[in-house]
């Protein structure tokens, strides 16, 4: 008798004033916790949008860009004023296609940008920064990662020293032409810090990491040694001045699939590293 009373007490399920004998089990509508869904946790009053669901928890982001994890419990959340049970979004036939960003990540509508981290990603120049933003901008804002320009890699060691990397202040560096024997590889070899990660692509310039088929050519032309690479490319392709051609080239990129895999892998490694 006593055991049955305790099971109906205030430390068990929420009280139902319309059912004083506790005979009915509350049933709440199930709502798929899709990224971008606006939710409120009952009890704490926390509000935000769904970022992800895993292992019985939902990660939600508030209006200040702060993330928190909440346990999925029956009737534990409110959506549009209605008490609901959040469940993982099922990938069943007929479900809406998941929107993706240019980088291939799940697009989260109306999610506020995360507060900027102390960690940074450095790239060599303006075009590198613009292309990274063009493809990975949504990911960078979601993770609170800022990209800054080096204006060349020659002074990288000095930049690292001034930055003073540490566990919560990591530094990721993206270099052009990071291949054996290159100037960039020699510069990178001099940096030995557990909180600095240097990655790069194989090409002499980030332009060449964009698939040439996007502009209707089979391969990028060979440029004679000593000639500025960008100027030589524009000359051989007959496309006018480099700034105008770069804008057209960059805007032709629709997603990570339009880039060489060496660049895609390098950038994603850096984002994971500085957001760790």
Image: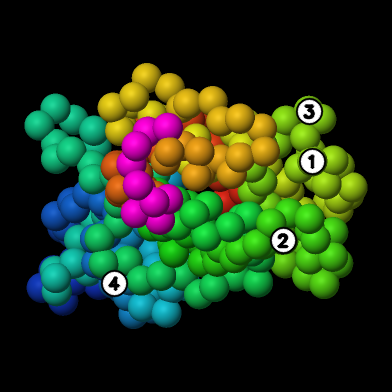
Residue depth check, mark 3 versus mark 1: number of the one nearer the observer: 1
> Which residue is at the front of the view, 230 or 94?
230
Q: Earlier in the sequence, mark 4 or mark 2?
A: 4
Residue depth check, mark 4 versus mark 3: number of the one nearer the observer: 3
Can the viewer see residue 23 in this picture? no
Residue indicated by mark 4:
40
Residue depth check, mark 2 versus mark 3: number of the one nearer the observer: 3
Q: CA distance from mark 4 to mark 3?
A: 53 Å
User: Of the numbered discs in the image, which one, if any, rests on residue 170?
Assistant: 2
Residue depth check, mark 1 versus mark 4: number of the one nearer the observer: 1
Tell me the crowding category of disc 3: few under 14, some 14 to 19, or many 20 or more residues within 10 angstroms, Cα based: few
> Which residue is at the front of the view, 79 or 51?
51
Q: Is residue 238 magenta?
A: yes
Tell me the crowding category of disc 4: few under 14, some 14 to 19, or many 20 or more residues within 10 angstroms, Cα based: many
Classify 171 as above or below 87: below
**Image quarter of residue 226:** top right
Q: CA distance from mark 2 to mark 3?
A: 25 Å
**Image quarter of residue 205:** top right
Q: Residue at x 56, y 40 (%)?
A: 229
Residue indicated by mark 1:
183
Could you say where residue 86 lies in the image, as x and y percent from the top left? Answer: 27, 54
How many numbered marks appear?
4
Residue indicated by mark 3:
180
Classify 217 as above or below 155: above
Could you say where residue 7 lies in the image, as x and y percent from the top left? Answer: 36, 61
Q: Is residue 100 magenta?
A: no
- Span shown in magenta: 236-245
């Amino acid at each position: 008798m006593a055991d049955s009373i305790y099971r109906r007490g205030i430390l068990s399920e929420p009280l139902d004033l319309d059912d004083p004998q506790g005979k009915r089990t509350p049933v709440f509508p199930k709502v798929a916790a899709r990224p971008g869904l606006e939710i409120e946790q009952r009890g704490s009053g926390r509000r935000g949008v769904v970022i992800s669901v895993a292992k019985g928890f939902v990660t939600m982001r508030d209006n200040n860009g702060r993330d928190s994890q909440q346990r999925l419990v029956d009737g534990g959340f409110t959506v549009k004023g209605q008490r609901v049970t959040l469940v993982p979004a099922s990938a069943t036939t007929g479900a809406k296609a998941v929107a993706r960003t240019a980088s291939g990540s799940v697009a989260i509508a109306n999610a506020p940008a995360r507060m900027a981290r102390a960690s940074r990603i450095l790239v060599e120049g303006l075009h590198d920064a613009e292309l990274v933003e063009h493809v990975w901008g949504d990911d960078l804002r979601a993770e609170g990662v800022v990209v800054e320009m080096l204006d060349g890699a020659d002074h990288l060691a000095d930049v690292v020293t001034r930055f003073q990397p540490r566990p919560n202040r990591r530094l990721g560096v993206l270099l052009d032409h990071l291949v054996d024997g290159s100037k960039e590889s020699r510069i990178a070899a001099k940096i030995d810090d557990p909180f600095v990660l240097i990655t790069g692509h194989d090409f002499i310039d980030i332009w060449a990491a964009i698939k040439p088929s996007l502009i209707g050519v089979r391969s990028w032309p060979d440029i004679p040694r000593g000639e500025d690479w960008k100027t030589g490319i524009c000359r051989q392709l007959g496309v006018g001045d480099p700034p105008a051609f770069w804008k057209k080239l960059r805007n032709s990129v629709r997603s990570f699939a339009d880039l060489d895999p060496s660049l895609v892998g390098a950038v994603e490694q850096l984002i994971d590293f500085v957001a760790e």
